[in-house]
Image: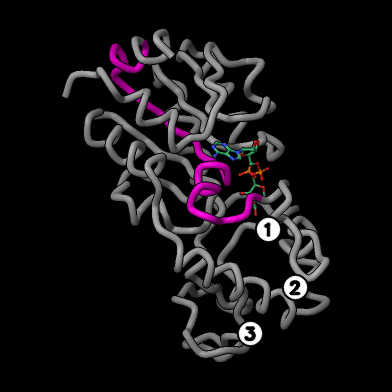
């Protein structure tokens, strides 16, 4: 913790990468933990284009259930600490894999939601993006009337143009990279973190369990984000 604090204090460009674990203490199930099941379906099977093609109604039902959990949840001290880091650091970027919207609600502004946002839908025909309507059922595009899908990056889909490039460009200049609450099973965010490390950033992993990142990290802070992140910020002068 002391080495991580010192590195953060000395840093000029800070990159933070978060995953589902940072929202676990807000009551949002992680993908690969116990909460990854819904009505017997595995989250990693439902979050796919194949699942949507086969049964769009089921996939929408699952997303509406998740959206309600996300909307009813509140940001926790981990999200607030990340927002606080942004206010302390001039040069800052947050890449989140989470679609729950808790980072922006905690006050984060310099962020990229690389997997999309649970509150948005996208037309399957004209690709226009709009807010998910409150009414039940499958949303239709407000422009062309075609079926809409959740505006979420699903398994097997390519990242949207520009999102990863921005992260990689920032990672190459970062001197501190903090990874929080991700198993590291999705290659792209892990690759951005390792790029930062390779270019000289001090890499910190915050996770109660060993992740794909922990063994590469300069410091693995083993514990829940809601406790560890405020501790990381403590004693750092305003
Ligand atoms: P995972 O569910 O794979 O991993 C969650 C991680 O959070 C695990 O390593 C846990 O040990 C850790 N964790 C649990 N509680 C924690 C806490 N209180 N504080 C810190 N860490 C904690 O979630 P992700 O790595 O985010 O993508 O999964 C990445 C992506 O997989 C998701 O964004 C989703 C899924 O495919 C898409 O939908 C495209």
In magenta stretch: residue 140? no
- Mark 2 within 8 Å of ligand 1, using the beta carbon: no
C-alpha gap between disc 2 and disc 3: 11 Å
Helix, strand or loop status at disc 1: loop
**Image side of residue 56 versus residue 221, left or right:** right
Q: Is residue 129 above or below residue 26?
A: below
Q: Residue at x 73, y 79 (%)?
A: 56
Residue 77 screen position, x and y as percent: 37, 42
Which residue is tagged 2?
Answer: 52
Q: Residue at x 42, y 8 (%)?
A: 3
Q: Is residue 102 above or below residue 39?
A: above
Residue 10 screen position, x and y as percent: 29, 11
Q: Residue at x 59, y 22 (%)?
A: 194
Question: Crowding at label 1, few (<14), some or many (≥20) Cα neighbours within 10 Å?
Answer: some
Residues shaded magenta = 7-30
Q: Which mark is residue 147?
A: 3
C-alpha gap between disc 1 and disc 2: 10 Å
Which residue is tagged 1?
Answer: 154
Does label 3 or label 1 sit earlier along the sequence? 3
């Amino acid at each position: 913790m002391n080495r991580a604090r010192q590195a953060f204090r000395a840093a000029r460009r800070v990159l933070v990468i978060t995953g589902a674990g940072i929202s676990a203490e807000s009551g949002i199930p992680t993908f690969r933990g116990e909460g990854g099941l819904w009505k017997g379906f595995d989250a990693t099977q439902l979050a796919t284009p194949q699942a949507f093609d086969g049964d769009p109604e089921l996939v929408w039902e699952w997303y509406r259930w998740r959206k309600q959990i996300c909307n009813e949840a509140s940001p926790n001290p981990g999200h607030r600490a990340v927002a606080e880091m942004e206010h302390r650091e001039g040069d800052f970027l947050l890449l989140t894999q989470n679609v729950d919207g808790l980072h922006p609600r905690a006050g984060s502004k310099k962020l990229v939601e690389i997997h999309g946002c649970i509150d948005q839908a996208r037309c399957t025909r004209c690709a226009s993006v709009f807010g998910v309507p409150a009414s039940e059922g499958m949303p239709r595009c407000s422009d062309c009337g075609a079926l809409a899908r959740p505006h979420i990056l699903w398994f097997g889909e390519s990242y949207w143009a520009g999102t990863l490039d921005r992260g990689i460009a920032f990672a190459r200049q970062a001197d501190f990279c903090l990874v929080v609450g991700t198993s590291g099973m999705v290659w792209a965010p892990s690759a951005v973190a390792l790029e930062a490390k390779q270019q000289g950033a001090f890499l910190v992993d915050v996770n109660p369990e060993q992740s794909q990142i922990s063994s590469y990290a300069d410091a693995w802070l083993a514990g829940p984000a809601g406790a560890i992140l405020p501790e990381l910020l403590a004693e750092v002068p305003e």
